[in-house]
Amino acid sequence: MTDFWTTVLEFSQVTSAKIGNQLLEYFGQVQADEKADGSLVTQADTWADKAIRDAIAANFNGHGILSEEGEKVFPDNDWCWVIDPIDGTTNFTRGIPIWSISIGLLYKGMPVFGYIYLPTLNQSFHGYWEGNSGLAAPTDAFCNNQPIFTSNDAPSHNHFFNVCSRSRSVIQKDFPCKIRMLGAASYNFLMVANSAVLGSIEATPKIWDIAAAWVILKAAGGCWKSLKLQPFPASPGVDYSHISFPTLVLSRPELISVFEPFLKDVEISL
């Protein structure tokens, strides 16, 4: 399987770099339309989604594809790529440089590889997660090809915790960390993976927001706690367009008891 993982990584690197270079031409220059679920989409999202899907189809015969702007019904294929062409579309349209191209690879419904690229920051994250897949996959996470790990620090007011716009109710006077809101679900999670923050909560992420980040976070040693539905294994025939997966991500399981009490007023949506 070594050659396979090398091929997957090189494909993700080349494809995301090519797409990212073009997206930089659109960055801060396009208008967004509101979709039925309230999220935003631009012509750049639509173009990038199709370009990535076309590249996968040309290089991985027999692999399924699920993407935010394309097919949203999970296919009945052993291998399936899950794509978010621009995670952080609002940031993208407003010229805020925190947005990413997210590419995840699932085997029999379970994420086994994730690659996330932030063109404006020249940052790439990738990881592998063997889990119980039976594949001979490594279990490692990287930022710009350097190994990353979650933090072992204890919470303090010199540490950070990320929230989304729908989870601001966690901000209370006795909250143990400083709060940050970055505007991109995948990057919120990645900051836990690389030990920059101790935890993160996203109230309404979709499967394409989390497929790649799930792998990287797990491989870096982090704790993924689903607050309602378990996202994986993904199920063939299911339409994922309106299913959210509220998630608490922490640098280690011991912090669940510290942060979970602050979640009681968070608006959890399915």
Image: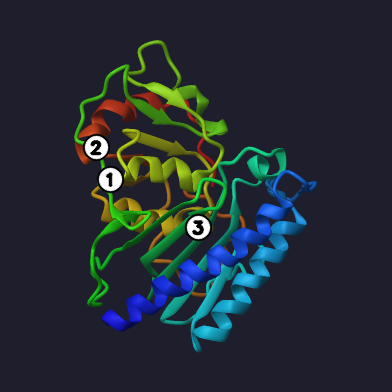
Q: Dot 1: few (<14), some (14–19), or many (≥20) neighbours within 10 Å?
A: many
Q: Earlier in the sequence, mark 2 or mark 3?
A: 2
Q: Position of residue 265 (x, y in %)?
A: 47, 25
90 is higher (above) or lower (below) than 101? above
Q: Earlier in the sequence, mark 1 or mark 2?
A: 2
Say which mark, if any, is on residue 207: 3
Q: Secondary structure at mark 2?
A: loop
Q: Secondary structure at mark 3?
A: helix
Does residue 98 appear in this view? yes
Say which mark, if any, is on residue 36: none
Q: Are marks 2 and 3 in contact (CB under 8 Å)?
A: no
Amino acid identity at mark 2? Ser
Q: Position of residue 1 (x, y in %)?
A: 27, 82
Q: Position of residue 270 (x, y in %)?
A: 54, 47
The residue carrying mark 1 is 223
Residue for point 39% across, 79% down: 7
101 is higher (above) or lower (below) than 170? below
Q: Dot 2: few (<14), some (14–19), or many (≥20) neighbours within 10 Å?
A: many
The residue carrying mark 2 is 151
Q: Secondary structure at mark 1?
A: strand
- 46 left or right of 143 in image: right
Q: CA distance from mark 1 to mark 2?
A: 11 Å
Tell me how many marks there are: 3
- 67 left or right of 144 in image: right
